[in-house]
Image (spheres, rainbow, N blue to C red):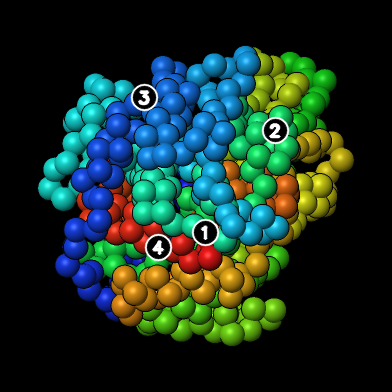
């Protein structure tokens, strides 16, 4: 879940207004789902030693055992990367003219060393109301829930009007090495075509056993690095001159540090501030709602109050920050080169070139060369939050979690949805699962997910996908 710990659903610890979580029911087929989930979690899918192909094959076998024919269950494996297989399966719809609903989850997980963990990261452990394992949450919880939903639909004879397409892909955590969604879009055009996709990126929040809200992600920032470089003839350090590469670089970084990109509040962020402000209350809640009420020209005092929170500030504007610096070649020599990496998180709809021009203008020094570095990220506007998208999710949330609001948000991190939108497939983060304020060890040690919220999220997705496909 690349950078999702920095996502838009960060809350202050002061949230107090919440609906109590309902007593956990036993949903149909729960034992079978747990077995499927355990099998998937215990297949190592790290880049270093794992195999997404093995995980794809295991889930394909589950679908075929439920009655899916071979023609509707396919595994796509890059010829030069035999362990990076991707599963695509489909439950056909009766309306052939209607585009499918795409259920997207990634199979790969972040690296985990046994010696660092309390428990074996590749054995599912249920303890104290939690499941522990690498991938227990990110993202095998959704991968298992989606696979289980297709199994249930087939077993009960559900006939959707729209086809339901499942894609379990590899490489979300290591996209600079390989990314299955990007590869499928390029090498197998059409295989991921859909009206829209449900993906990771938003769950909700649980604090002290209470569900605060159900999240829906609509749009995410673009990740892009820029390299700053200053070159200089250098010389002996006993004869210093004012034209010093390190000083020029430092001056450029100081200007970037002092600069704020313009505020641009999109639909998802407006709804987030309005609904989260009502939930949070207090001065910050009032400020959030004031910003939401006038997104084109927020009251300055309210804007400054909201911007004082780094997470909220990141939702309102593009941000750029220095992350790496290197300079000089000897203790007794004037620097011949000074360079820095500036990491930008760009609002959806703003271009990489547009931010390059802004950085160049802010620095205002022709001797500081600024260039985008690494792979250029695709750029698209955020997907629309229509009644078609919000309606079914809201209905199921009210049914399962009475009084708990749906809160849309734009993520300040990144998921595979960033590849879908430029290809014409809007991606929305929706799971019905709730996370806790500490992040649950995602990408870190002893990753965990609450047992009750996993089962609830599984049922939530099963119900909501049915509504979307009718």
The residue drawn where x is 43% and y is 75% is 395
Tag 3 near tag 4, CB within 8 Å: no
Q: CA distance from mark 2 to mark 4?
A: 30 Å
Task: Please tell me the numbered disc located at residue 463.
Answer: 4
The residue drawn where x is 56% and y is 49% is 92
Residue 204 sits in quarter: bottom left
Q: Nearer the viewer, mark 3 or mark 2?
A: 2
Q: CA distance from mark 3 to mark 1?
A: 34 Å
* Marks 3 and 4, the one that precedes in the sequence: 3
Tag 2 near tag 4, CB within 8 Å: no
Name the element at disc 1: loop
Whether residue 199 can be seen here: yes
Name the element at disc 3: loop
Q: How packed is label 1: few (under 14 Cα within 10 Å), some, or many (20 or more)?
A: many
**Residue at numbered disc 1:** 160
Residue 177 or residue 316, whichever sits in front:
177
**Residue at numbered disc 3:** 44
């Amino acid at each position: 879940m690349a950078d999702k710990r920095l996502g838009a659903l960060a809350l202050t610890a002061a949230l107090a207004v919440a609906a109590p979580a309902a007593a956990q029911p036993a949903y149909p087929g729960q034992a079978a789902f747990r077995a499927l989930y355990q099998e998937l979690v215990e297949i190592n899918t790290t880049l270093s030693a794992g195999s997404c192909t093995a995980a794809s094959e295991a889930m394909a076998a589950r679908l075929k055992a439920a009655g899916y024919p071979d023609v509707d269950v396919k595994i796509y494996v890059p010829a030069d990367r035999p362990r990076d297989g991707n599963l695509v399966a489909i439950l056909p719809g009766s309306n052939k003219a209607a585009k499918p609903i795409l259920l997207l989850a990634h199979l790969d997980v972040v690296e985990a060393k046994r010696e660092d963990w309390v428990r074996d990261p590749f054995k599912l452990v249920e303890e104290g109301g939690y499941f522990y394992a690498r991938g227990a949450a990110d993202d095998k919880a959704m991968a298992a829930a989606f696979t289980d939903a297709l199994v249930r639909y087939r077993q009960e004879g559900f006939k959707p009007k729209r086809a339901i397409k499942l894609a379990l892909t590899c490489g979300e955590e290591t996209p600079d090495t390989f990314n299955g969604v990007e590869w499928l879009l390029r090498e197998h055009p059409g295989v991921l075509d859909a009206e829209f996709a449900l993906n990771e990126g938003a769950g909700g929040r649980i604090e002290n056993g209470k569900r605060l809200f159900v999240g829906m992600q609509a749009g995410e920032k673009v990740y892009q690095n820029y390299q700053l470089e200053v070159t200089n003839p250098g010389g002996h350090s006993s004869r210093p001159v004012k034209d010093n590469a390190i000083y020029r670089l430092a001056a450029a970084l100081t200007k970037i540090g002092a600069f704020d990109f313009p505020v641009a509040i999109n639909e998802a962020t407006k709804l987030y501030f309005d609904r989260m402000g009502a939930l949070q209350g207090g001065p910050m809640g009032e400020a959030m709602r004031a910003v939401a009420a006038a997104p084109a020209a927020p009251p300055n005092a309210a804007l400054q109050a909201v911007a004082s929170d780094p997470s909220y500030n990141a939702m309102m504007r593009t941000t750029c920050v220095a992350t790496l610096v290197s300079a000089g070649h000897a203790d007794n020599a004037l620097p011949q080169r000074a360079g820095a990496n500036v990491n930008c998180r760009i609002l959806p709809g703003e271009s990489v070139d547009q931010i390059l021009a802004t950085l160049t203008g802010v620095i205002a020094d022709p001797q500081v060369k600024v260039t985008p570095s690494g792979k250029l990220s695709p750029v698209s506007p955020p997907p629309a939050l229509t009644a078609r998208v919000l309606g079914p999710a809201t209905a199921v949330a009210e049914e399962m979690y009475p009084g708990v609001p749906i809160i849309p948000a734009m993520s300040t991190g990144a998921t595979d949805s960033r590849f879908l939108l430029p290809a014409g497939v809007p991606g929305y983060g929706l799971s019905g699962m709730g996370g806790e304020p500490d992040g649950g060890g995602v990408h870190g040690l002893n990753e965990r997910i609450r047992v009750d919220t996993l089962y609830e999220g599984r049922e939530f997705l099963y119900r909501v996908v049915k509504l979307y496909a009718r």
